[in-house]
Amino acid sequence: MKREKKTYLRFVVFAVSLVLVGLDQLFKFLAVEYLSPIESYPIWDGVLRLTYVENPGAAFGIFAGKAILLTGVTGVLILALIVLLLWGKIKSTYLMWCVGLIIGGGIGNLIDRIAMQYVVDYIHVELFNFAVFNFADCCVVIGTVLIIVYFLFIEGRKGNRGKEKTDSEDQINAGK
């Protein structure tokens, strides 16, 4: 029964990834329709603006002009994550959701790169003078950070607990 739940969950996570893609494309459509003529719109003065930017590269504009490379690498990574997710290679429910976020965001930006050779960005945090980004970027970053947290603090502690147990068992056995 538990295995059936995990199988069902994998498809739910993938379906949610596709919903994230749809939301991302909707937000980008709205940015193109309503921001591109005026370029920028303040949401919270000095803190947050909606600013239309066409990003031909990856994060912070790196690899600009390398759309084919970015498209190929992104496509291969997303395909690998989809295969790992749907074939049940990712066992942890937590990791499934993290990978789902990355898949959704990755596909959202991949659609832009394939269709337009650039990614539409529109969220501009002025408070920190940070790069303009989009919803798909948020999904990828949040999913990636949560995976790092998982391996540093959750999986890492499991490994340490196993090592501590082995060390204490060795000490007990050495005393015999």
Image (cartoon, grey):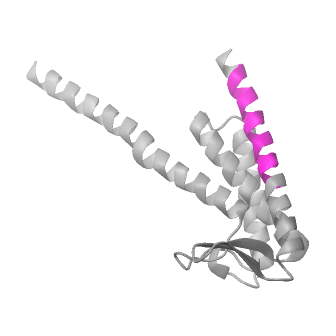
In the displayed structure, would residue 144 be above or below residue 129?
Answer: above
93 vs 83, left or right, is left
Residue 11 included in the magenta stretch of the image: yes
Residue 8 shows in the view: yes
Between residue 5 and residue 50, name the one nearer to us: 50
Residue furthest to the top: 1
Residue furthest toward the front? 45
Q: Residue 5, image x and y in percent?
A: 70, 22
Residue 164 location, quadrant: top left
Q: Quadrant of the C terminus?
A: top left
Predominant secondary structure, magenta span: helix
The stretch drawn in magenta includes residue 17: yes
Q: Residue 51 vs residue 116: left or right?
A: left
Q: Is residue 55 visible?
A: no
Q: Residue at x 54, y 50 (%)?
A: 146
Residue extending farthest left = 175
Decide which of 90, 100 is in the foreground and name it: 100
Query: In the image as oriented, which residue stretches furthest toward the bottom?
Result: 65
In the rendered image, which quarter contains the N terminus? top right
Note whether 18 is above or below 46 in the view shown: above
Q: Nearer the viewer, residue 45 or 12?
A: 45
- In the image, 58: left or right of 156? right
Which range of residues does the magenta coloring cover? Answer: 4-21
Residue at figure coordinates x 79%, y 69% from the top left: 71
Residue 130 drawn at (x, y percent):
57, 76
Instruction: Pinpoint residue 4: horizontal percent, then vertical percent.
Output: 72, 20
147 left or right, relative to 74: left
Give the residue at x 72% y 79%: 57
